[in-house]
Image (cartoon, helix red, strand yellow):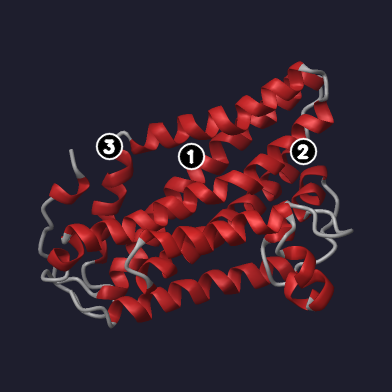
């Protein structure tokens, strides 16, 4: 059943949250009442845990764990970017957004519902499930399970990195009317960080900027190791600045998306 075909139920209430419950139910149904949830989960397990299993088969256990983190940092943000731009642009182009705004729905609630519903779906499919499987993969291969608390912390850093690109693409989808700029800008930042052709000149000329970007959360930057590695091994994090900076970026992206959608004419 298409999520867009779900009837919205009138609910009384005011403020920016008017219509949030209905909109949230609609967005959640686009995950859990369609095949999206299991397709996303299957893709995540095949990409992340599949490549990890292939590396383990070669006997390189430490390399397999690093490959898992590298693959997550490099490719998972692309899934978040694709989903975020489609959830905004798809509804704008199909006319669904214009239709729902004729109902008792405040525009901030439109964005907040998407952040909550799709943020939760991405957390389950691309972080919780593959990291949990990776935990047991490592334990079975080595006979010694890693520190569970450290793995949970690493999971949080991986999700924060993912959430950055999701909210970035959500914001860009409210600023542009085509998929090209959204995918282009998002992919440039997502791939440019791990591959180094963006981070290297920034690190040389404006190293302070590196401290407030998410790249070092999951990937080494210059001579600095990724924070996720410290977390997974149970070591104290050398700095919290990238975490705080990334959280602030996510809030800014959400704020700009709300500001822009309130001024959009449908």
- Check residue 125 in the rendering and tell me which mark sits there, or answer none: 1
- Which quarter of the rendered picture does the N terminus lie within? top left
Q: Residues within 10 Å of mark 1 (few under 14, many from 20)?
A: many
The answer to whether residue 211 shows anywhere in this view is no
Can you identify the residue that label 3 sits on? 34
Q: CA distance from mark 1 to mark 3?
A: 14 Å
Does 193 sit left or right of 185 as displayed?
Answer: right
Please state which of the two labelled residues, at mark 3 or mark 2, is closer to the viewer: 2
Q: Looking at the picture, does residue 224 appear above or below residue 259?
A: above
SS for dot 2: helix
Q: Position of residue 254 (x, y in %)?
A: 45, 72
Q: Position of residue 241 (x, y in %)?
A: 74, 71
Q: Looking at the picture, does residue 124 appear above or below residue 164?
A: above
Residue at (38%, 66%) from the top-left corner?
173
SS for dot 1: helix
Can you identify the residue that label 2 sits on? 66
Q: Position of residue 135 (x, y in %)?
A: 69, 31
In the depicted view, which residue is nearer to us: 18 or 200?
200
The answer to whether residue 14 shows anywhere in this view is yes
């Amino acid at each position: 059943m298409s999520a867009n075909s779900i009837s919205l139920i009138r609910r009384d209430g005011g403020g920016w949250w008017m219509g949030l419950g209905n909109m949230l139910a609609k967005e959640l149904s686009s995950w859990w009442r369609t095949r999206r949830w299991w397709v996303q989960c299957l893709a995540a397990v095949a990409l992340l845990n599949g490549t990890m299993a292939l590396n383990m088969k070669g006997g390189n256990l430490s390399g397999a764990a690093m490959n898992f983190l590298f693959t997550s940092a490099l490719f998972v943000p692309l899934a978040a970017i694709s989903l975020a731009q489609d959830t905004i642009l798809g509804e704008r182009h199909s006319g669904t957004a214009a239709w729902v705004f004729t109902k008792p729905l405040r525009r901030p609630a439109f964005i907040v519902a998407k952040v909550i519903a799709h943020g939760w779906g991405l957390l389950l499919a691309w972080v919780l499930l593959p990291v949990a499987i990776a935990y047991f993969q490592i334990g079975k291969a080595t006979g010694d399970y890693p520190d569970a608390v450290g793995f949970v912390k690493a999971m949080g850093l991986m999700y924060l990195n993912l959430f950055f690109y999701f909210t970035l693409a959500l914001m860009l989808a409210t600023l542009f009317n085509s998929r090209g700029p959204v995918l282009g800008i998002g992919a440039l930042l997502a791939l440019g960080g791990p591959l180094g052709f963006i981070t290297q000149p920034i690190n040389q000329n404006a190293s302070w900027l590196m401290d407030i970007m998410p790249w070092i959360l999951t990937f080494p930057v210059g001579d600095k190791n990724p924070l996720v590695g410290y977390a997974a091994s149970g070591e104290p994090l050398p700095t919290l600045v990238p975490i705080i900076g990334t959280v602030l970026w996510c809030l800014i992206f959400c704020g700009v998306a709300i500001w822009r959608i309130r001024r959009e004419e449908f």
